Amino acid sequence: MSLNWREIDAVLHELSLEGSHIQKIRQPDFQSLIFDMYRPKDRFSLLISMAQGKTRIHRLTKQITNQIKLQRFSQFLRSRIKGGRIVEGYQIGSQRIIKITVRRGGEITILWIRLWGGAGNIIATDEKGKVLDAFYRRPGKGEISGGSYFPESELSADKTGDKEYSIREFQGSGDFNAKIENYYDSLDQEKEVSSLQSKAKNVLSKLLAGNENKLAGLRKRLKEYENFGKFKLYGDCIMYSLHSIKKGDPWVSVKDFTAPGEILEIELDPQLTPYENAEHYYEKHRKAKSGLTVIQKEIAKTERECGTIEDQLKNIDKTDEIEILQKIIKENRREPETVQGRKKPGLSFRSGDFILLVGRSARENDELLRKEVKGNDWWLHSRDFPGAYVFIKNIPGKSVPLETLLDAGNLALFYSKARASGKGELYYTQVKYLRRPKDGKKGLVLPTQEKNLSVNLDSGRLKRLQEECRII
């Protein structure tokens, strides 16, 4: 609620502006001005706010950080009245219009501070009422340079309207100015707390959704891994029936020697020989067996994280400390990563605790290699097909888990010419084992000490990664 005219009178009575010098003019936001004042044995700041529903004037004791650059009207005031002396400052009757007359040298400037809730303004005129400039320029009302504004001759000084006003009781200690400042600080804090609570809920909800999607993918993978024994069975059955399978067959029907009378329909890769298809299933068995424990640990960790986030969400409305809310937002919001204000090239994904970087072109690959990765980071690329470089950022003291390697492998395959086949061969090594060929094309590297990785595109895994993707 804005100050009424009696409260404005009380504020001005305590301030006694006459004789004060304007040392500095600040504009913290688009609705306020601050004058830093000086008079013998006293320095103080004066806040003038045009905020709708909170138009006011009072002494300011707290520190306010500038959120914007100095605007046009503030620059004008600096050139016109900075260093000037206030000759007089009073309210026109009961009209909530304050007249402040400033003398600097032989020049007089009058500031008309109109504290009307829906039409507040600060208008600077000369002694004859000619408008020099205004905080809000309103041509329709003549509140623009060259217009005319002289409210003392237009308004009745004793007009108070039908409503009787009194000075309200404001909580707090100190004089009336101090209580007013405390009152509006409380309003601003309540508004900021409400805004931060809303932001925190939004940030946590997005984080929870991402973790729940990740959890769904992990549980799906767990089901596949829990049946890892079937992959060995498929390999054994193919080896048992090598004589009846030929390269190019998409399927094979074989007897299940673990269940007499049962027939198994096993999918084959037509590009592989029967023996290579058997090896393919043996490899899947080894990966699933070793990955089962990793998946179970990752599921438990992600479930704990979801529980923590849910608890935070339940308690947000009970949290009214600005610092705590800001910390929650900062710790859980995933912002685009920048280096010295420069955006990183390519795409960034999160896999557990690891960051995956993807270069989608020769330029992005080259920039990532030169500026964003180090020797102990891991590099992946599709074999025999052009495509993206995928990097796994190293975490000191932690080895790359299988799930993260498969995440990176899926990205490398997805962002390559091998995507259409749905599967492919990759190789990977650490960045320190990459060599740039002499006079090679931009981004071209030759790997050494590389290892092989066979990957089948997993739509669930890709969806989870892409939902957490941050374009940087």
Image (cartoon, grey):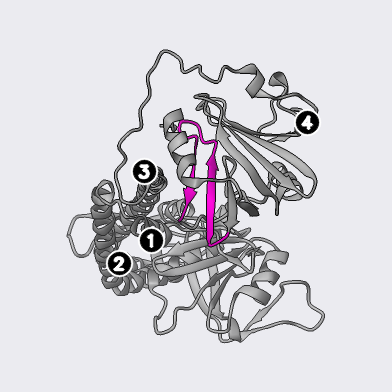
Residue at 56%, 27% (x, y): give it.
92
Q: Position of residue 325 (x, y in %)?
A: 35, 55
Distance of mark 1 from mark 4, alpha carbons?
A: 46 Å
- 92 or 326: nearer the viewer: 92
Badge 1 amino acid: Lys
Of labels 3 and 4, earlier in sequence is 4
Of labels 2 and 4, earlier in sequence is 4
Q: Is residue 467 above or below residue 221?
A: above
Label 4 environment density (alpha carbons within 10 Å; few <14, some 14–19, many ≥20): some
Label 3 environment density (alpha carbons within 10 Å; few <14, some 14–19, many ≥20): some
Of labels 1 and 4, earlier in sequence is 4
* Farthest-out residue, top: 162
Residue 148 belongs to magenta span: no
Viewer-side label of 3, 2: 3
Q: Which residue is mark 2?
A: 298
Q: Position of residue 98 (x, y in %)?
A: 57, 33
Q: Which residue is mark 4?
A: 145
- 331 or 390: nearer the viewer: 331
Label 1 environment density (alpha carbons within 10 Å; few <14, some 14–19, many ≥20): few
In the picture, which quadrant includes the N terminus? top left
- Where disc 2 sits, the SS reads helix
Distance of mark 3 from mark 2, alpha carbons?
A: 50 Å
Distance of mark 1 from mark 3, alpha carbons?
A: 26 Å
Q: Position of residue 309 (x, y in %)?
A: 29, 55
Badge 4 amino acid: Ser
- Where disc 4 sits, the SS reads loop
Give the magenta-colored segment's residue range: 40-61
Q: Which residue is mark 1?
A: 327
